[in-house]
């Protein structure tokens, strides 16, 4: 599946925030990079993949890495210097047949959020209003919940969800990564107003002191130790190994790594890849829009700031 990471300024050589993600999708699915200018909307509604919701008056210019069949995006960046990637996660909460895809929420967060925190608020507000759900694959049934890594030049946030419930944690480590498992082992810095009471009412914990979002909401639970040979463990290890020396080439190298199957080949394959360097000027963004980052060259993409 997918891997997303961020390196904060004290971990990078150039002092930028560096963001990276591989999008692992079913083999043969077409994923392309699209550029959408800042837009003033006359239509009061926007048709997401499965759901129509109210549109905002204006949306930011975005670069999106998008499976062609859906409205949303696996990852991307906006003209304000925000980058977002999502991960599939499996939880104890029920899966809905309709709602916003995690990929829809990525796009909506980028189109509407001027900062990482504003994008976080966009996503959580929409999640609480409309829920998440719907088939996440083009040719077969696949439904999951989502986690997100949201970054700008000043900060980064991890947002993890289970159905309508969510917790968010500001990144304080030099590097942080997420894969296909819940990872926030407490109540986070921000949370759904009813997530703790829901866990208590369900008999999963007795009080806030016992609340552990990842442990309580993960399907199958979570391990207290992470193998360095797993994808999640390998990404974390490589990020930590390069703290203080992290560069764009470091990020690209991690996303091309095969030891932990980060660059994925097989029934699921790394169909797209993004590396962004976020700074006071907004940032620079490199993408691959073909399978297998290990065989491709990252190409810089520019925003289209003029409405067509």
Image: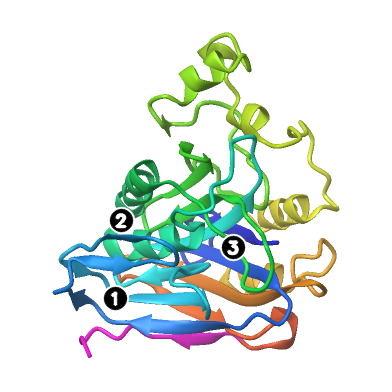
Front disc: 2 or 3: 3
**With respect to residue 27, does 137 lie above or below?**
above
Given residues 109 and 101, the one toward you in this image is 101
Q: Which residue is mark 1?
A: 61
For image coordinates 55% across by 48% down, the residue present is 174
Residue 285 placement (x, y as % from top left):
46, 77
Nearest to N terminus: mark 1 or mark 3: 1
**Residue 16 seen from this side:** no
Position of the C terminus by quadrant: bottom left
Q: Residue 278: x and y, percent?
A: 41, 66
SS label for mark 3: loop
Mark number displayed over residue 115 = 2
Q: Secondary structure at mark 1?
A: loop
Where does the magenta region start and end? 298-308
Query: Real-space Cα distance between discs 1 and 2?
Result: 13 Å
13 in relation to 271, above or below: above
- Name the one closer to the observer, 136 or 150: 136
In the image, residue 225 lies at what x, y percent? 79, 35
What residue is disc 3 on?
A: 136
Residue 277 in sight in this render = yes
Q: Is residue 144 left or right of residue 201?
A: right
Please check the rendered image and state whether residue 199 is part of the magenta-colored stretch, yes or no: no
Q: Residue at x 53, y 57 (%)?
A: 134
Q: Quadrant of the N terminus?
A: bottom right
């Amino acid at each position: 599946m997918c891997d997303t990471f961020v390196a904060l300024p004290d971990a990078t050589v150039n002092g930028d925030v560096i963001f990276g993600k591989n999008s692992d999708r079913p083999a043969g699915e077409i994923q392309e990079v699209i550029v959408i200018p800042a837009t003033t909307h006359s239509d009061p509604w926007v048709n997401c993949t499965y759901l129509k919701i109210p549109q905002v008056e204006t949306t930011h210019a975005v670069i999106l890495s998008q499976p062609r069949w859906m409205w949303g995006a696996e990852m991307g960046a906006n003209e304000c210097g925000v980058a977002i990637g999502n991960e599939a996660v499996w939880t104890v909460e029920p899966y809905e047949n309709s709602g916003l895809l995690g990929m829809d929420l990525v796009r909506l967060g980028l189109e509407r959020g001027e900062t990482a925190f504003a994008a976080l608020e966009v996503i959580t507000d929409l999640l609480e209003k409309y829920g998440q759900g719907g088939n996440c694959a083009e040719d077969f049934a696949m439904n999951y919940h989502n986690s997100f890594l949201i970054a700008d030049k000043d900060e980064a946030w991890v947002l993890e969800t289970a159905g309508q419930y969510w917790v968010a944690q500001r990144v304080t480590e030099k590097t942080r990564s997420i894969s296909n498992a819940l990872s926030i082992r407490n109540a986070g810095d921000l949370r759904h107003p009813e997530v703790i009471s829901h866990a208590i009412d369900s008999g999963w914990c007795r009080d806030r002191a016992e609340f552990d979002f990842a442990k309580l909401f993960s399907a199958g639970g979570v391990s207290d130790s992470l193998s360095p040979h797993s994808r999640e463990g390998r990404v974390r290890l490589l990020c930590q190994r390069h703290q203080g020396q992290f560069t764009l080439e470091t990020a690209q190298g991690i996303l091309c790594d095969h030891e932990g199957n980060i660059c994925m080949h097989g029934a699921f394959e790394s169909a797209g890849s993004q590396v962004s360097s976020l700074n006071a000027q907004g940032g620079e963004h490199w993408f691959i829009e073909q399978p297998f980052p290990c065989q491709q060259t990252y190409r810089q993409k520019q925003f289209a700031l003029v409405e067509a």
